[in-house]
Amino acid sequence: MILEKIHDPNDIKLLNAPQTQLLCTELREFLITHVSQTGGHLASNLGAVELTVAIHRVFDTSRDRLVFDVGHQCYTHKILTGRKDQMTTLRKFGGLSGFPKTSESDCDAFNTGHSSTAMSAALGMACARGIKGTQEKIAAVVGDGSFTGGMVYEALNNMAEVKTGCLVVLNDNEMSIDHNVGGMSSYLSKLRVGQPYNDLKNGIEKALMHIPVAGEKLAKGLKRSKDSLKQIFVPGMFFEEMGVTYIGPIDGHNIRMMEETFRRAFKLNKPILVHVKTI
């Protein structure tokens, strides 16, 4: 049993790929067994197992800040952060809360329980990080259903203005933005978060601007062409137009792909939305 070896929040980082996949199977069996006895949110947690595991392999949850929107999908997070043996008390008087709770663990960053608030909370933490001069990673996990709430769009608007490093993971388990998951979307995701792409894009525009007379016109033409191509080939242009870099959609059950994407996204140190598709 791999799950029996997970006690500390960072234990998950010691697992190899086959062990990590086995852990996800054991986590689902554990959730079904315990939630069927205590009651609680089952489907939302079963769908977010790999996503939560991938985030924990990238995060140091005792230092980094992970904010769940609503919070009904946080059971795997609780299991991986030292509360596995308390799951028999889930949603019972004096037992574990069915939602993130800062008084339970330092790994719970925010007391959630309402939809559409996580992005604003995470952005506030990112602004506080800038004031304090610390280096922790900050992410919000938001379901596609939360995008019916106005606070999401207020947060997007503020993220574009503040321009600080804050990751939003859109956990999409319905037809929310796009249904494409495959080689091209994976390629675009890697390309868009890769530093060479950003350096190349900026370098070409600067070089064109130095061409006498026609340089500025060429640069503007390139930008118009680039924006038109992105409208055709790159999903999530709504977020891009808001000023938040969009990546995806990617398979929300592919741990390796999510890990690579999250690591690259954090290196860019700007507001980024990663769109993951889960079942």
Image (cartoon, helix red, strand yellow):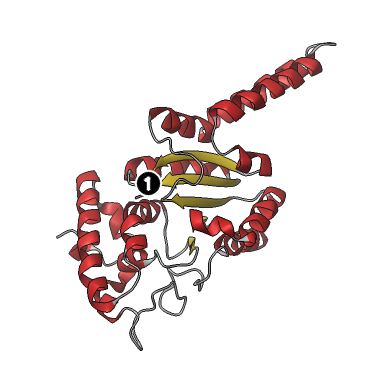
Name which residue lies at 54% across and 31% down: 234
Left or right of 56, for residue 144: right
Give the percent coordinates (x, y) of residue 75.
34, 67
User: Circle 1 is placed at which residue position?
Assistant: 252
Left or right of 235, for residue 90: left
The reply to whether residue 236 is in sight is: yes
User: Outermost residue, right direction?
Assistant: 213
Give the percent coordinates (x, y) of residue 188.
48, 30
Give the percent coordinates (x, y) of residue 230.
60, 28
Q: Is residue 140 above or below residue 278?
A: below
Left or right of 263, for residue 10: left
Name which residue lies at 30% across and 59% down: 46
Q: Is residue 216 above or below residue 266?
A: above
User: Outermost residue, bottom direction?
Assistant: 93
Q: Quadrant of residue 246?
A: top right
* Residue type marked 1: Gly
Q: Is residue 203 above or below residue 265?
A: above
The reply to whether residue 135 is in sight is: no
Q: For mark 1, give the secondary structure.
A: loop
Name which residue lies at 42% across and 40% down: 250
The foreground one among 210 and 239 is 239
The foreground one among 161 and 44 is 44
Q: Quadrant of residue 3?
A: bottom left
The foreground one among 249 and 52 is 249
Name which residue lies at 47% across and 76% down: 102
Circle 1 residues within 10 Å: few <14, some 14–19, many ≥20:
many
Q: Quadrant of residue 25?
A: bottom left
